[in-house]
Image (cartoon, helix red, strand yellow):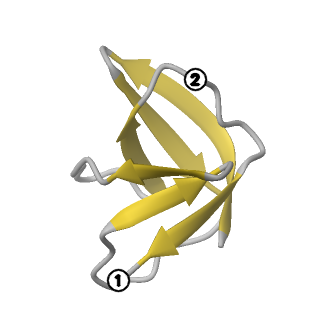
């Protein structure tokens, strides 16, 4: 699991910066604050994930669902 340490918005998407490197595995979804989110592909942003949401996730735990 990782913790969200920063975030920014691009239209309907939240880009979340994490406190740890992401392991390269095949994940199907993210679980944040008890809610499952589909993965939105992003490139060239280290320690970042993207989801479709307009909420804040600062200091929330992110679980990677395989």
- Residue 51: x %, y % from top left: 38, 41
Question: Vertically, is 4 above or below 2?
Answer: above
- Residue 33: x %, y % from top left: 68, 48
Element on which disc 2 rests: loop
Question: Vertically, is 12 above or below 42?
Answer: above
Q: Nearer the viewer, residue 30 or 21?
A: 30
Q: Which residue is mark 1?
A: 24
Residue positioned 66% across, 66% down in the render: 2
Question: Vertically, is 15 above or below 42?
Answer: above
Q: Which residue is mark 2?
A: 55
Tell me the tag on residue 46: none
Residue positioned 33% across, 85% down in the render: 25
User: Horizontal placement of 64 versus 56: left or right?
Assistant: left
In the picture, which quadrant includes the C terminus?
bottom left
Q: Nearer the viewer, residue 26 or 17?
A: 26
- Residue 63: x %, y % from top left: 58, 68
Q: Is residue 47 visible?
A: no
Of the two numbered discs 1 and 2 in the rendering, the one whose residue sits closer to the viewer = 2
User: Horizontal placement of 5 versus 63: left or right?
Assistant: right
Residue positioned 26% across, 47% down in the render: 40
User: Horizontal placement of 50 versus 54: left or right?
Assistant: left
User: Horizontal placement of 2 versus 25: left or right?
Assistant: right
Q: Earlier in the sequence, mark 1 or mark 2?
A: 1
Identify the image quadrant of residue 1: bottom right
Q: Nearer the viewer, residue 48 or 65?
A: 65
Crowding near the residue tagged with mark 1, few <14, some 14–19, many ≥20 C-alpha atoms within 10 Å: few
Residue positioned 78% across, 44% down in the render: 59
Q: Is residue 14 visible?
A: yes
Element on which disc 1 rests: loop
Crowding near the residue tagged with mark 2, few <14, some 14–19, many ≥20 C-alpha atoms within 10 Å: few
- Residue 41: x %, y % from top left: 21, 51
Question: Vertically, is 23 above or below 40?
Answer: below
């Amino acid at each position: 699991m990782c913790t969200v340490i920063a975030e920014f918005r691009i239209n309907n998407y939240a880009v979340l910066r994490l406190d740890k490197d992401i392991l390269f595995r095949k994940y199907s979804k993210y679980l944040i604050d008890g809610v499952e989110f589909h993965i939105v592909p992003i490139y060239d942003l280290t320690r970042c994930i993207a989801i479709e949401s307009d909420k804040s996730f600062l200091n929330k735990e992110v679980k990677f669902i395989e």
